[in-house]
Image (cartoon, rainbow, N blue to C red):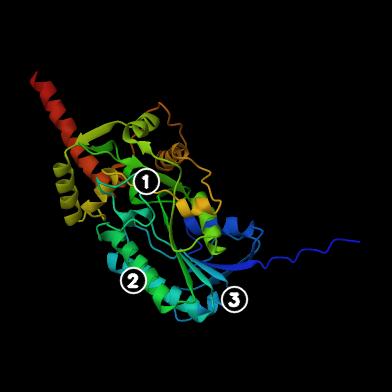
Amino acid sequence: MPRPRAPRRTATAVAVTGAAGAIGSALLRRLVAADRIGKVVAVDLRKGEALEGVVWRTGDVRDPSIAQRLAGADAVIHLAVDWRLESPPAERTALNVRGTQAVVTAAAAAGVRRVVVVTSAVVYGALPDNRIPLPEDAPLRAVPEGIVADLLEIERVADDARRVHPGLDVVVVRPAALVGPGVDTLITRHFAAPRLLVIKDTSPAWQFCHVDDLASALELAALGRVSGAVTCGSDGYLTQQRLEDLSGLKRVEIPASLALATAERLHRVGVTPAPASELAYVMHPLVVPSTALRAAGWSAVHDNEDNLAAVLAAVEGDRAVAGRRIGKRDATVAATSAAGATVAVLGAAAFVRAARKARSR
């Protein structure tokens, strides 16, 4: 007598906002290959990569019709966040905060069961007394400036949504510093500077998260394998010395007071789009444990050394990094973050002083 067939699990329909971006592209490829994911709807201002199994719906997430674009989804993964450093702050915040509010409200109205929001581990803040690693329920102590202020507001929107829409499961994923194809952030630009900025008497801990590992974490979140706020990052971290040994980058060491004052002046006169508070992330440890994700069976495929190599390849071209000096990059790129501009200005000043000393001998 044949054994009865087990009932087939219902596949989860997932909608992804901001699907044409770097994270969205990696996520869509992951979702269409997943057995437990059914229909995949991609929402963005423009169509991205054409993938079999992905239905594209163009539009702004702030448009009232967004609820129609999310209709039929069991889970929504919200990636329509502007991370660009050069975006006008008011326009960026309007998309990031109002867009998140609109998506959460539309998802609840459309009967979606779960919304997954991506912020960043930077919301915890980089402080000298941070534990390594920080527990996932640690307080959010970041300075609310620039993009970080937007991310903190998105976190607030998620908290409010849990109270206003009790039937909606809202999951927040906080990745460590992202790396991978198409990723352009404050941290990746730090490595485009002509020399590696090191602040005297500080002990940074370098942890990264590859976009492919984030995509696998978001898949689990969409399937309801984690809840609340969770972190996502590669195992462990790199010390400053290990990072320098791997990258081959030469350092310029600067007192904290000088670095912060220079970065603040550069930001005030419009040379850099990022505030001086950004420098905290290259001064103090910020390592997250991915505790909830690991309990759900997730693990990072890429380690921190691989991720550092990916960053260096992105800013300098495809080169080996172990024991090899990285060439200079155009100064305009180096000047696009507070860290990069600070090291460019102070590094140049150091070279001038050294040259003067040599001539005086």
Residue farthest along the top direction in this orientation: 361
Does the residue at mark 1 contact the one at mark 2 (Cβ under 8 Å)?
A: no
What residue is pinned by disc 1?
133
Nearer to the camera, 33 or 324 = 33
Report the residue at 39% width, 69% height from top: 158
Q: Quadrant of the C terminus?
A: top left
Report the residue at 37% width, 59% height from top: 83
Q: Earlier in the sequence, mark 1 or mark 2?
A: 2
Q: Earlier in the sequence, mark 1 or mark 3?
A: 3
Within 10 Å of the Cα at label 1, are there few (<14), some (14-19), or many (20+) other Cα atoms?
Answer: some
Within 10 Å of the Cα at label 3, are there few (<14), some (14-19), or many (20+) other Cα atoms?
Answer: some
What residue is pinned by disc 2?
94
Q: Secondary structure at mark 3?
A: loop
Q: CA distance from mark 2 to mark 3?
A: 27 Å
| Image label count | 3
Q: Secondary structure at mark 2?
A: helix
Report the residue at 56% width, 77% height from top: 71
Q: Is residue 10 above or below residue 210?
A: below
Measured as percent of width and height from the top left, residue 30 is found at 59, 55
Q: CA distance from mark 1 to mark 3?
A: 39 Å
Report the residue at 54% width, 50% height from top: 298
| Amino acid at circle 1 | Pro
Measured as percent of width and height from the top left, residue 20 is found at 50, 61
**Residue 229 falls in image quadrant:** bottom left
Q: Is residue 326 visible?
A: no
Residue farthest along the left direction in this orientation: 360
| Amino acid at circle 3 | Gly
Given this view, does label 1 or label 2 mark the residue nearer the observer? 1
